[in-house]
Image (cartoon, coloured by chain):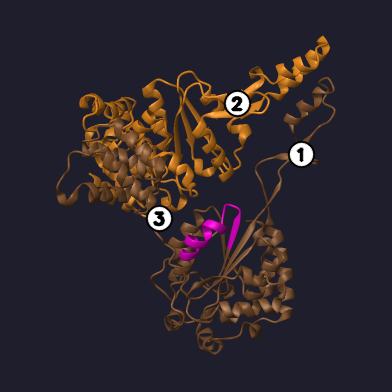
Chain colours: A orange, B brown
Amino acid sequence: MDGGPRPPAHQLMTDWKTLSDELAREGYVATPDLAMALYLSVALGRPLLLEGAAGVGKTEVAKALAAARGTNLIRLQCYEGLDANHAIYEWNYQRQLLSIRAAAEDGVTGKTVEERLFSEEFLLKRPLLEAIGKDTPPVLLIDEIDRADEEFEAYLLEVLSDFQITIPELGTITAKSKPIVVLTANGTRDLSDALRRRCMYSYVEYPDRATEIAILAARCPDVEDHLAGQIVGFVQSLRKEDLDKKPGVAEMLDFAAALVGLGINDLTDDPAILQASLATLLKTQRDRANFTTEVAQRLAGLAA
Amino acid sequence: MNGLRLGVSETDTALRALAEVVAYDPAHARLALKAVCTGCAEDTKRFDELFDAYWMNGGRVKARVAPANIAKRQHTRTTATEEGMMSSGSGERNSPDGDGEGDVESDGKGKLIASRAANLLKKDLRDVVGPTDISEAERVAESIGRAIRDRRSRRRRAMRKGEQIDFRRLVRRSLSTGGEPIHLPKKARPDRPVKLAALCDVSGSMTVYARPFLAFLIGLMRNDPASDAYLFHTRLVRITDALRDPDAMRSLNRLTLLSDGFGGGSRIGHNLAHFARAYAPKFVDGRTVVFILSDGYDSDSSGDIGTALEALRRRGCKIVWLNPLKSWKDYEPITRGMASAMPYLDGFFAANTLGNLAALEHELERL
């Protein structure tokens, strides 16, 4: 750093903070860790791997980022058995067949037909191919990568390092612009070291109280401050209980929306309504059964 | 070093990352390096401490961070070898099996086993398992293997007799007939073999069941070249190679030598954790079914079975626990070890004789 030309500090400083502000404008409150990781992955053109429990807002990051940068969001939801036909490309076979028939009737055969059949016209672009074919870099969200099997992960590595895809009939397609890649995982299985090494990494935790209140304020502006504090306090203490499925941020927002819809101003007002609105937070039978009115009232009392 | 996975390319990334931020501001450098250097949740938790320990020497904040230093620092990390973590077989050979049986006794049901256990210490396995057992077991193992072997793949492949038409091939073939799809190539889901890994508890409390279980293991091994077997008591030993011996009785002999400490106490949690750490990365994947044959009486309270199974689960395998005690009337998995294991099991079945094991076939098919 010594002696070299150094860009003005304030300009750099604003960069990742600007990103953080832009996200906030889209209603996403990012921690400094996450904002920095996101900024670096954009700046260095590396994929960003986000891990964390379900419902901490990993997928939302990509949506907010796409909105903030004004680009498209291309989403690839991974599942077991996901294969190249669904992730990269597929030929439009029905159209190809029709076109062959039409060509045969016109008396066109041979190489010309074949060339036309295997042109981009008949190519169905799946998320990965679509993402590298855009002029402006889109945000490519590869959701729940740990659900796809290892073979796909290995293939993905190749695509993410070169940003090019080979189609036997067409040749190699190189990216017009490098997409911003966000991968999410929530630990269904261990990811390979190779994938981890290639990515920027951020572990997304449940937000702390102040952050979560900020999120609530950003998403549901019509919740009063007093109630917002209660809701966040209640949900956060709920997460400390022994639950099968802990309520995430999205559930907290549903809960808040439900309370506002029911016209509640204070959590402790009406035990029956509170118990009913727990449907937005507790998602298994066991959790519902264990979470009696008394427990709910105790937590609500603490949160008040 | 420090368990972080860093190579030369990470050094490069780290430098480029620092060039993007205000590198002389510790807060920024910290966040930037955190994004680059960490790779999993545990790394993230430790990173701040490591950062402080290295850069914030003794509370004296060095405000300027020279990138040249970072490069050197990272380089030394890469040349150092990864932390050796394989504390293999740390079990004491002749650890007393007394406290394990204490568990059994307090249960009020297992006294019979506890009193007979001592007789079988240092037993030659050839006395435990006879040749007839083995041929019987091979038959059982084969049927069980068949029941769970063929897990269908979700992908489809070109096949002669498939239920779906392979359009990609169809278009190609129809070109030669002027667009008339005469040949209809088919595709189907190929069968993907499921691998078996069996961990058999041969501690004192399990000796009465050793006969069917060992025979079962041998049958399994001789029947399926992809399966894998382990014995554990106070230590965990991989016995796959010994069991592959073409001579069944000689393989038992080799087993006897390997399993010194047979009939001793069992450290289930410790051994399972060791398995998850040392063997599972190599032998267990998403298409593996892990059998654990044990009564769940852990004589070592330090090892946590639940945590070990959770780690194992993350490899995507199925875990089936075969517990001989489950066939007892009114048996409930209430011992601490067994209770902590329950949430992570895909199957929990009774098994104390070969006949019992054979009956499992249908249960396992449903898995």
Instruction: Point out the image quarter for the C terminus of chain A.
Output: top left
Query: Would you place residue A78 above or below residue B332 in this image?
Result: above
Label 1, secondary structure: give it. Answer: loop
Check disc 3: other Cα within 10 Å, few if <14, some if 14-19, many if 20+.
few
- What amino acid type is highlighted by mark number 3? Thr
Which of the numbered marks, if any, corresponds to residue B163? 1
What is the CA distance from the residue labelled 2 to the residue labelled 1? 32 Å
Q: Which residues are magenta?
A: B273-290
- The residue shown at (27%, 36%) is A213
Label 3, secondary structure: give it. Answer: loop
Label 2, secondary structure: give it. Answer: strand
Judged left or right of residue B18, residue A196 is right
Question: Residue A90: image x %, image y %?
Answer: 65, 28
Q: Which residue is mark 2?
A: A172
Q: Nearer the viewer, residue A300 or B72?
A: B72
Q: Is residue A207 visible?
A: no
Residue extending farthest to the front is A3
Q: Chain of mark 3?
A: B
Frontmost of labels 1 and 3 is 3
Query: Would you place residue B326 above or below residue A103 in this image?
Result: below
